[in-house]
Image: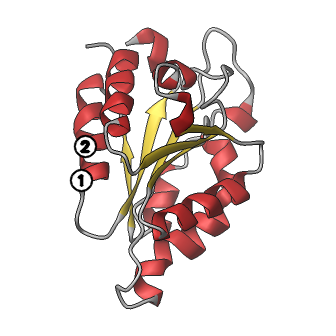
Amino acid sequence: MKYAEALKAAMHFLAEDPRVLFLGQSVGVPGTAMFGSLKDIDPGRRLELPVEEEMQMGMCNGLGLAGMVPVCVFPRWNFLLLAVNQLVNHLDKMRDMSHGGYQPKVIIRTSIGSERPLHPQQQHVGDFTEAFRLMCHNVEVIRLEEAAEIMPAYQKALQRTDGKSTLLVEYGDYHHEK
């Protein structure tokens, strides 16, 4: 199975769970390669949001606290940087601050920006995987390098019972190359 096909299959797997909602940029309308993996999901389960990353992550934190499993979509790492406060200071620390009382499950989906066929310049191709692994203790960061890793990683993210959220990192170029 190719990389893009594996992502589409994983999104359909997630959509089978009634608790799952997809929120973010390019989830309701085309604009990035990520839309291709979501376009066949029921539009009622996808909420297109404006480019307001901290608000988006905060909404997903709240949905997670309410028992939903939001899939928070940031098409590129560089966009996710604008939601660091909600991710690192809130979602990642909630379990510890509440002594295990609050353990929202949020699935965060991002990508190392595509460089081919057109390089969008440095503000769109960052890879901050290692930095976030150092900053987060209750959010597991998983880089998806091969198509075969995609479904198991998303299954783990949805089915985990350890009280952690999951940040999955895709490669934008692989949507068309692998």
- For badge 2, the amino acid type reads Gln
Mark 2 — residue? 155
| Along the line of sight, the residue nearer the viewer: 114 or 150 | 150
Report the residue at 77% width, 42% height from top: 50
Compared across the picture, whether 154 is left or right of 68 comes to left
Above or below, comparing residue 150 to residue 70 in the picture? above
Question: What is the quadrant of the C terminus in the image?
Answer: top left
Residue 36 at x, y percent in the picture = 52, 18
Say what secondary structure mark 2 lies in.
helix
Report the residue at 38% width, 26% height from top: 7
Above or below, comparing residue 98 to residue 40 in the picture? below
Question: What is the quadrant of the N terminus in the image?
Answer: top left
- For badge 1, the amino acid type reads Gln
**Cβ atoms under marks 1 and 2 closer than 8 Å:** yes
* Residue 145 visible to the viewer: no
Report the residue at 22% width, 65% height from top: 161
- Residue 145: quarter of image: top left
Dot label at residue 170: none
Give the class, few, some or many, for how many residues have Cα within 10 Å of label 1's Cα (few <14, many ≥20).
few
Give the class, few, some or many, for how many residues have Cα within 10 Å of label 2's Cα (few <14, many ≥20).
few
Residue 163 at x, y percent in the picture = 31, 70
Residue 93 at x, y percent in the picture = 49, 78
* Residue 11 visible to the viewer: yes
Mark 1 — residue? 159
Above or below, comparing residue 117 to residue 47 in the picture? above
Compared across the picture, whether 19 is left or right of 129 comes to left
